[in-house]
Amino acid sequence: MRHGIGLLRSCVLLGAVVPLLAPLLVGAQPAEEDLQQQMEEVKRATDLFLRGQKLIFGKGDLTLELDSFYASDTKMQFVRTGAGYQLAKITDRSAISALIVRYGLLDNLELDLEIPFGSVSQNADLGGARSRQDDQGVGDVAGRVRYQLWHEEGAQPDVVLDFDVKSPSAGKSLLGTDNWTVGGAVGLVKTLDPVVFFGRLGYAAALQRHSVASGDAIFYVLGMGFSLNDRVSLNMQVNGGVVGPAELDGHSIRDSSLDLISLELSVTTRVTKHLFVEPFVSLGLTDDATDCIVGINLPYLF
């Protein structure tokens, strides 16, 4: 009997307490959802420096990015003259900006569009003769579709597939290549806390337009990065590529193949909830690579 009375009292007490706790219990779920959203935002912010290596944006996410850089490069190369080809000292100076739009079509599918613009000056020294050429305007517009095939789990890394296309929208100017280029790549990303390692291997084919075509290219990226906190990340990567000889009227131009290797260092800092600042410097490690590039990237997350 006491047992029954005790049980009855417990039920009565519980009936009185539950209505008092109901608002707290109902409010707990939104609080958990807000916390989950904040954690996702922090994760995306700390992974932003990997936006070129894997998909960090979900379906419907939109990012606008303005990349600006100054590049200086001097090299010896063959140029076409009235008598054929002659070895000349070429000095290029570029001030380029690019607007990059990234949009998440699906959680594992992203579409990128890049529109470069700026100015380039080129000085050519052919012994006693010197010439200068200046160009400014819009460069070759490029697009990319990225698909995340696998997500990192255990020993398995992230695996990302890219398909790229670049138009000859800048024509024969110094801002363009005057030919279509299509290519693809596969990228791997592996986390070993607190460091993230990444790599990419790809191929780009130049489609001939008019009578001149640049060579096909095999390119690669090897790098590592880590987040100091939820606002600052460091990144170091080696960008490389081997470009085959260019062709003129279906014939290869001798000594026109390229070996490109550069070292890039960058720091990604979150300024506000949506705006990031990423200064970077790239140093050429081979004669064919651009000597020096200094710039800043400004991604904005909507």
Image (cartoon, helix red, strand yellow):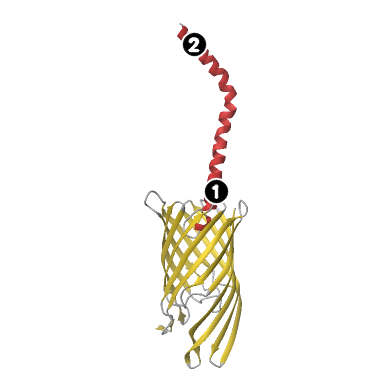
Identify whether 106 is placed above or below 10: below
Residue drawn at x 57%, y 84% as measured from the top left = 123
Element class at badge 2: helix
Percent of width and height locating residue 83: 48, 93
Identify whether 156 is placed above or below 52: above
Q: CA distance from mark 2 to mark 1?
A: 50 Å
Indicate which disc residue 6 carries. Answer: 2
Q: Residues within 10 Å of mark 1 (few under 14, many from 20)?
A: some
172 or 236: nearer the viewer: 236
Q: Residues within 10 Å of mark 2 (few under 14, many from 20)?
A: few
Residue drawn at x 42%, y 83% as measured from the top left = 255
Q: Place residue 244 in its image quadrant.
A: bottom left
Q: Which residue is mark 1?
A: 42
Percent of width and height locating residue 166: 49, 69
In the picture as drawn, the residue positioned furthest to the left comes out as 155
Percent of width and height locating residue 281: 55, 67
* Left-right relation of 35 to 208: right
Element class at badge 1: helix
